[in-house]
Image: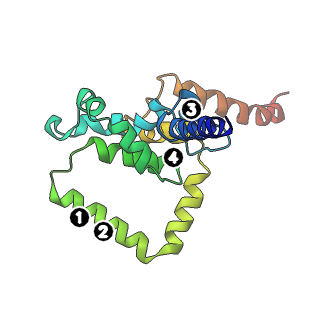
Amino acid sequence: MALIQALRLAAESGRQRIREVFHRTAERNAPTDSNPCELTGPETTAYFRVLSPECPEADLVDDRTWSDLEMERVFNRLNKSTTPLGAQHLYALLRHSQSCPELLQENVRANHAFASNPKAGTALRRVLRELGRSESAQLASFLFGQPPTVSPRHRLFYLVSTAAVLCPFGLLFSP
């Protein structure tokens, strides 16, 4: 009787460990405020979505192939980024098939530059870590997107500002 209970307990313990390792729930994948480097799906793909119109379509891994190959799981296993921008860059690298050797060499050179100068890498990580999830998700579109348009009424702002500065001087000359 005790042997059967011990076997049941061991089997349940084994099942629990397998569930913890292989079954990822939405709660475990959801970002928490305690870890600002974890991003939601749209935040992770923001950098890729901004860069994808510039790349030839033959170099992009489409959504169906991405899901068929379960690349999201591969991304989650590979992602050891310390900043949200690092996670976004890794996602974009996985979605682009780097057929151009020059781009691959550029990535290798950047890696060697940071490996040879650890102080620069540490300083960059410290600055980028201060960006929150929402700021890093919007940074790609800010850097690579269209510049903001200036309203045609911006001249009115200059006129009102000039009038506000000149009003005290007008009081000096009024009778």
The residue nearer to you, when weighing 45 against 64, is: 64
The residue nearer to you, when weighing 3 against 35, is: 3
Q: Residues within 10 Å of mark 2 (few under 14, many from 20)?
A: few
Q: Residue at x 36, y 66 (%)?
A: 111
Among the two numbered marks 3 and 1 on one chain, the one whose residue lies closer to the N terminus: 3
Q: Is residue 170 left or right of residue 105?
A: right
Residue type marked 1: Gln
**What's the CA distance linking mark 3 and mark 1?**
35 Å
**The N terminus lies in quadrant:** top right
Among the two numbered marks 2 and 4 on one chain, the one whose residue lies closer to the N terminus: 4
How far across and how far down the image is residue 139, in percent? 48, 41
Residue under pointer 4: 84
Residue under pointer 1: 105
**The C terminus lies in quadrant:** top right
Q: Residues at badges 2 and 4 in contact (C-beta under 8 Å)?
A: no
How far across and how far down the image is residue 136, in percent? 52, 42
**What's the CA distance linking mark 2 and mark 4?**
22 Å
